[in-house]
Amino acid sequence: MTDRDADLASLGLRERKKLMTRQAILDVAEEMFAERGFDGVTVAEIADAVNISAKTVFVYFPAKEDLVFAGEDQMREEVLAAIRDREVGQTPLAAMGEFLRGQITASGAAPVAELDRLRRTVGDSTVLQARLRLMWEHFEIALAEQLAEETGQPPTAPVPRAAAAALILVFRLLGSEEVLVHLRAQPKSRQRAAMLDWLAESLRVIGAGLADYAPRTA
């Protein structure tokens, strides 16, 4: 029995049905978006495939883009927990590195393939691109508030805000098209290792600071 099955079994019939309907909506939406793109699929078509009404879809997901970013809140909480619950003496930078390495190595499918799927779904959709930027901003603000509370500073102070922005930037860039281009150039057998190498180098740059980075020589 998987963890998900165990969670379902612990719930009442009504709650199980709601969770199963929610997952069915997400599964169908993901498949349709992958085939035809976000803008090429309507909520009515997703609802019809799940045999429910469009109104019911909106009960579970208030906006169409929520179907793509359904895991946003959970991921944000996982990031915050990784920083908040780090070991004594461990820095936020080290904790973020540990968290991201875990994400890369624990991925069931090839991580580059998973990121490719997300990039294809977002595609040229201005709605999803805007939502993606907003997601990262929410991550930064939440982490800045957490770091500020831990260090006794206001959340708008420059150090926690800049630190949060730098930490989330590493996460953000891992899924960027630019990094994916770099990773796709590697043999498939090397792509996961190449992603870990990229992560290590980016963490090194942030850890060292940018004060001495690339002074102009001419």
Image (cartoon, rainbow, N blue to C red):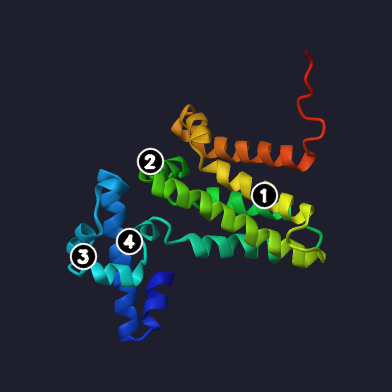
**Dot label at residue 165:** 1
Q: Earlier in the sequence, mark 4 or mark 3?
A: 4
Tell me residue 189's x, y (percent): 47, 34
C-alpha distance separating marks 1 and 2: 24 Å
Residue type marked 4:
Leu
Tell me residue 168's x, y (percent): 63, 50
In the shown orientation, is residue 35 left or right of residue 179? Answer: left
Observer-nearest of 31 and 107: 31
Q: Secondary structure at mark 2?
A: loop
C-alpha distance separating marks 4 and 3: 10 Å
Q: Nearer the viewer, mark 1 or mark 4?
A: 1
Residue in the image at 48% along x and 30% along y: 181
- Circle 2 sits on which residue? 123
C-alpha distance separating marks 1 and 4: 30 Å
* The C terminus - image quarter: top right
Residue type marked 3:
Val
Q: Nearer the viewer, mark 1 or mark 3?
A: 1
* The N terminus - image quarter: bottom left
Q: Nearer the viewer, mark 3 or mark 2?
A: 2
Q: Secondary structure at mark 3?
A: helix
In the shown orientation, is residue 84 left or right of residue 69? Answer: right
> How many numbered tags mark residues here?
4
Q: Earlier in the sequence, mark 1 or mark 4?
A: 4
- Circle 3 sits on which residue? 50
Q: Earlier in the sequence, mark 3 or mark 2?
A: 3
Examine the rendering and report whether any part of residue 218 can be seen. Answer: yes
- Circle 4 sits on which residue? 26
Q: Residues within 10 Å of mark 3 (few under 14, many from 20)?
A: some
